[in-house]
Image (cartoon, rainbow, N blue to C red):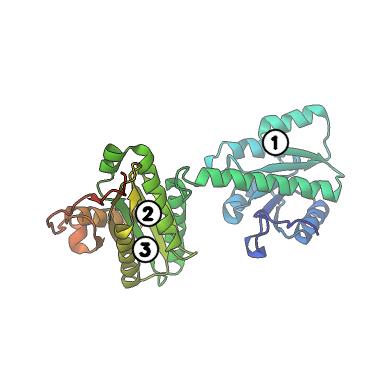
Amino acid sequence: MSAPPLGLPGGPLAERARILHVEDSALQAAYVRSVLERAGYEVRCCPDPGLFAAELHEFAPDLLVMDLLLPGTSGHELVRWLRRQERYAALPVLFLTSEGEARTRIATIMAGGDDHLVKPVARELFLAAVRARLERSRRVNELLRLDGLTGILNRNALLDRARDLVDAQRRKPWQPAVWVMIDLDHFKLVNDRHGHPVGDQVLISAAALLRRNLRRRDTVGRYGGEEFALLLDGLDEAAALRLVEGLRQELAAATHSDGNRGSFRITLSAGIAMLAPAMDLDQWRAAADQALYAAKAAGRNRVVVASPSVLAGRGRRSADRSPLQPMVPAPGG
């Protein structure tokens, strides 16, 4: 049985990799499209180098197959430009060209190409090169997008997803989206009293708790330090509040080992902000952050929904709750 041809190994066709082929020969483009589509990839051809930047933005490819000789420019020139764009610095580029001299191969390397195949190339070799580059790119992107400690999305990847939700709501204003900011209460005391390795385990446990309680369409990320953020797609305010309150209660009931056969509990504060049609990304994020600040100012270990009074900075204060709830050490501790 042949291996699955997708950029995400074994994944469904709905997640198949997108390949942009930059080629001005209609005959060559048709052949490459046929080979790649039969292998399960989604393919788009760009015959005009002047449309290259627009095609990149609209199609968002996972890999480029690049011809070398193009009208008015060269594939090397396009890839040199590509590598200067932060967004595409790691996009895999496979050159497919009739130019096979050593100096041309060296120029491909210097321009930022990942592979240089000379036409005519065996179908199996071409597909193997495509698959290998896609798998490597997928793995690199995972490493770049995930927080190294908790395994959930890092801040940059989280913000990318938030931008997608903002763009989606502009197309479908009736589709709700929620930003939840979460802060572990008095987390510095965990590190001070029990040490950073224990603190790291608390962060890992908290991330796991958040992840297992969310739907597949939702997003969880580490915003920084002991702060997490949730992006809830399609939930209204009441449903979001029930979900986050459940998370708060579950975390408050969980116990953590202090490394010396004793244990303690920790709580969270959270701020919830609905994405309003007129909001941009920064306004949405700021609304959730202000709601979180109001929850902390009101005594922590609670959830606050952004409202006009909260956004105006009028969070109600109350007596603070015990920051760390120690438990009786285990026997022999």
- Which quadrant of the figure contains the N terminus? bottom right
Q: Residue at x 40, y 58 (%)?
A: 210
**Which element carries disc 1, helix, strand or loop?**
helix
Task: Pinpoint residue 244: horizontal percent, then vertical percent.
Answer: 33, 64
- CA distance separating discs 1 and 2: 41 Å
Residue 224, can we see it?
yes
Residue 8 vs residue 321: left or right? right
- Give the number of the disc on residue 178: 3
Single out the mark in the foreground, 1 or 3.
3
Task: Pinpoint residue 215: horizontal percent, then vertical percent.
Answer: 46, 66
- Give the number of the disc on residue 76: 1
- CA distance separating discs 1 and 3: 44 Å
- Front residue (pair 42, 269): 269
Single out the mark in the foreground, 2 or 3.
2
Q: Earlier in the sequence, mark 1 or mark 2?
A: 1
**Which element carries disc 3, helix, strand or loop?**
strand
Q: Could you tell me the amino acid type at mark 2?
A: Ala
Q: Could you tell me the amino acid type at mark 1?
A: His
Q: Could you tell me the amino acid type at mark 3?
A: Val
- Give the number of the disc on residue 144: none
